[in-house]
Amino acid sequence: MLTSQEQLKYSRQIMMNKIGEQGQTALRNAKVLIVGVGGLGNPASLYLAAAGVGTLYIADGDTIELSNLPRQIQFNEQDINQNKADTAAQKLTEQFPDSEIEAIDDMLDQELCDYYLPQVDLVLDCSDNIKTRYLINQACVSHKVPLVVGAATGFDGQQLVIDPREAHSACYHCLFPATEKAPANNCQTLGILGPVLAIVAGMQALQAIKLLTGNNAQLNQLNLFDGFSNQWQQFNIKKQENCSVCGGKTE
């Protein structure tokens, strides 16, 4: 049961029919891994901690640079050259004492995936490189852990929910097979605006909260955001039966 303090603090969420006290308790008991504490991981971790998620593992081996500050909103100039995960964990712990925050101050690899994924209920992919995306996707499929993917460059963003617990759910490899030319552009080559990242990260946090509280999150739907025209578009995707990651067959 929630304490009286928790009932007051999260009252605006609890009064929602699709959340309620049961959903808020589920958030308190949830464990989420956020991979990448950059432009997406910064706001996503803030929103999940603020919503009352009980445990956040945040993974990033990078250090903070001056060019990060316009979009990585937890950091300031005094944090430059510090590890992103350690710094974010400290700030989140100070701001949200109800949540347990654990920093993983290294780049996620197979060994770390195999250690942490059995412990968590959900993964947010807030990374900025395709190699990490493939690794996380493979690990989540193997461990049957839901995955919320986000990406953004320039004025554009994308978001996708993958749930390996559902037999019909496509994975990231279905959409961008490793044998084909996968999207390799990132903010270092195309630039990025902070508010675009905030919108995509907010969508990731929303989808995560829905999944954690037992609500429906749209599977097999790629959400594309055009920040220049202020439009969202949705595209249906299909699970590929010959996918080497989730299709049960080898290529």
Image (cartoon, helix red, strand yellow):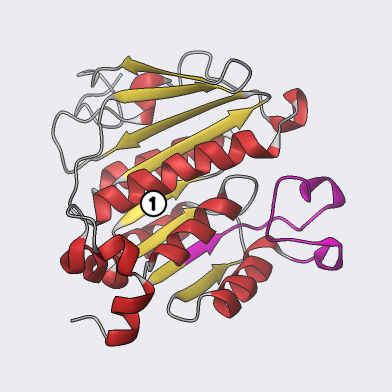
The residue located at (28%, 42%) in the rendering is 141
Q: On screen, 115 above or below 177?
A: below
Counting from the top left corner in percent of width and height, residue 88 is at: 63, 66
123, 231: nearer the viewer: 231
In the figure, is residue 202 to the left or right of 240?
right
Residue displayed at 61% across by 57% down:
60
Residue range (magenta):
57-82
Q: Residue furthest left?
A: 167
**Residue type highlighted by circle 1:** Val
Tell me: 51 left or right of 170: right
Q: From the viewer's perspective, is 152 left or right of 172?
A: right
Residue 62 pos. (x, y %): 71, 55
Q: Mark 1 points at which residue?
A: 123
User: Could you say which is closer to the camera, residue 17 or residue 203?
Assistant: 17
- The answer to whether residue 111 is visible is no
* SS at mark 1 in the image: strand
The image position of residue 16, as x and y in percent, is 23, 56
Name the quarter where the N terminus is drawn: bottom left
Q: In this view, does 221 lie above or below 213?
A: above
